[in-house]
Each structure stands twice: as C-alpha cells, then as structure tokens.
Image (cartoon, grey):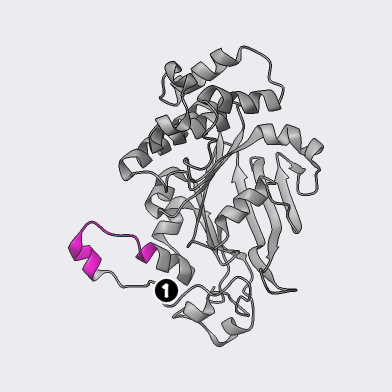
Amino acid sequence: MSHAVLETRDLVKYFPAPGKRGSFVKAVDKINLRLEKGQTLGLVGESGCGKSTAARTICRIYKPMSGEIMLFGADISRMNEQQLKPYRRRMQMVFQDPYSSLNGRMTVKSILEEPLAAHGVKGNYAEMIGEMLEKVGLEREHIGRYPHEFSGGQRQRICVARALILQPELVICDEPISALDVSIQAQVVNLLMRFQREQGLSYLFIAHDLSMVRYISNNVGVMYLGKIVESCESGEIYKNPLHPYTKGLLSSVPIPDPKLARAREPLIPEGEIPSPIDPPPGCRFNQRCKSALPRCADVDPEYKEVAPGHFCACHLF
C-alpha cells in the first residue's frame, strides 16, 4: 500500500453553541479520511454537514478537540505554530469565495509575494510570480492589478496561484468552483487537474456538484451531520451506493434525458437536517431514512468495511 499523504483518525471539532451554555455544535464528529499521494479525495454532502469545518481543521485553521491529523506521516493535531510552519508550506488551501479570500487593498504582486516571504523562499519574486501567473492562464502584466479588476474566474486563478506558488504536495480545495459561472467551473477544474498531472499533487476536493466530484476524484467520502457515512472509489459509489443518504444525494442529480428522469425512483430524503447542536440518537440519518430499522433510533452504526475498499456506516449492512 502506498503511503498516505493525509489521514485523519477519529477527528473531532465542536464549537460552543451560541446562547446555550454547556452545549456544542458538533460540526466534525470522529471522521476518518485517507488520501494517497497523487490522488484526489472528493468530500460531498449537504450544506452545513461539516465539510468546510473538516477542511479548516485539517489545515489547522481550527484546532481539533481530539483525534489525529496524520500529514506526511506526522501527527500535526497538537503542534504549535512554530512546529506547524514547515508543514504549512507543504499543505495549502483554495477557499470557496474568490471575492472575499483576496485582500482588495493588495495587488497581485503583493498577494503572491506574501506566502513566499512568510516561508523565507529565496529568489527573484517577480520572476516566480510571472511564471506562476502564466501557468494559471493569466498574463505577467496583471502583476500590478488589484482583485476588483478581475472577473470571478480570474480571481480564483489568482487564489490557485497563491496556493501553488509554494510548490505544496497537498492542496485542500474548499468548494473552489461553487461561486463561479458554470462556463468557468470546468476551466478551473481542468487547471487543477493539469497541475496534478505535472506536479503529482494530492487534492482534498470539497464540492456540492456530484458530477464534478465524479470527474475529478479517485475516491469519494459522503458526509452527513458531522460524520462520514460512506466512502469508496469514485466509480463504485456511483454504480453501487449503499447508504440511503448517498442514494438520496445521487437521486437529486439531474438527468438530461427526460424519459430516464421520469423512470428514476425518487429517493431524495424528506424533511430537514437535524440541528448539529442536538443531533438525534443512534444513526443521525434515521429520522429522514425510509429504510430505517428500529435500532437505528438507538444505536450509532459502526463505520466499517462492508466490501473491499467500500466503507459504510449503516445497520442495513
């Protein structure tokens, strides 16, 4: 087995619930992920399920409450900022909104110089920045411009350039295309895939668009209310989804053929996602699941391997 670039073990991140003393928002609750070198792990789920919190905890923007974050074989979950610095250079992040993740008072030159200076990189910064701008499909002449002078797609290219200029080995992409026009989304994804082929990058790719996740990912993890409920190879999860929630997610993907769309059995979950402050006992999906068993309301299902390489947390298996 190849060595994992990233592995989380029972990773937990809670936040104090506003206005409720002693209560917590259980954003990430004992999740286990594994990402191999040179591959892409897609992480999908409804809004509010904890995907972005998981990404920021893995990056150590948030400090985990418990569990392990194994990055290149070292546990970074308890490291201080000085110990983390060498790992931060090897792990970068592309944020969701290119309009808020760039400082409007800084030029492109200043934005891309900042990580180089922070990590003490030596060399001709102007030349490094010019080369990186060309690699992401921008012009060297853009170096003196401000973010408001670019379109959304161009801003996200600047964000990609900022993440890649340090030549990291792992890039965490937190819904990097959701704020972009559909016509631009494929351009940004193809750009990321080209860098992966050329530099052997590993991606943790978070998205709502299941078709895009299928296109870019080697493996997929499905997240619901702070927990991973299913994970396996990308093709397998689309051909043979096991967890009722995964089936519901796939059922919500539009089919361009009207006849096939009408013939498809609707499996979209009913009702609203329960509050992460007070999640239901047992399986967290039991209140919305049409296949729920009596014990689903009391016993939290074990996340286990139910087929070779296919993990699921469901009492049906």
Q: Residue furthest bottom?
A: 294
Looking at the rendering, which quadrant does residue 298 occupy?
A: bottom right
Q: Position of residue 47 (x, y in %)?
A: 49, 61
Q: Which residue is mark 1?
A: 269
* Picture residue at 65% right of the left edge, 67% below the top: 26
* Picture residue at 74% right of the left edge, 52% below the top: 68
- 79 horizontally vs 123: left or right: right
Q: Nearer the viewer, residue 220 or 111?
A: 111
Type of residue at label 1? Pro
Looking at the rendering, which quadrant does residue 190 occupy?
A: top left
Q: Nearer the viewer, residue 243 or 145?
A: 145
Q: Position of residue 185 (x, y in %)?
A: 37, 41
Counting labels gives 1
Q: Position of residue 207 (x, y in %)?
A: 47, 51
Q: From the image, which quarter does the N terminus lie in?
A: top right
* Picture residue at 73% right of the left edge, 52% below the top: 63
Q: Nearer the viewer, residue 213 or 79?
A: 79
Instruction: Please tell me whether residue 77 is drawn above or below residue 47 in the rendered image.
Output: above
Q: Which residues are magenta?
A: 250-262
Characterize the local packing of mark 1: few (<14), some (14-19) or many (20 or more) Cα atoms within 10 angstroms.
many
Q: Position of residue 302 (x, y in %)?
A: 64, 70
Q: From the image, which quarter does the C terminus lie in?
A: bottom right
Looking at the rendering, which quadrant does residue 88 occupy?
A: top right
Q: Residue furthest front?
A: 105
Residue 254 belongs to magenta span: yes
Residue 257 belongs to magenta span: yes
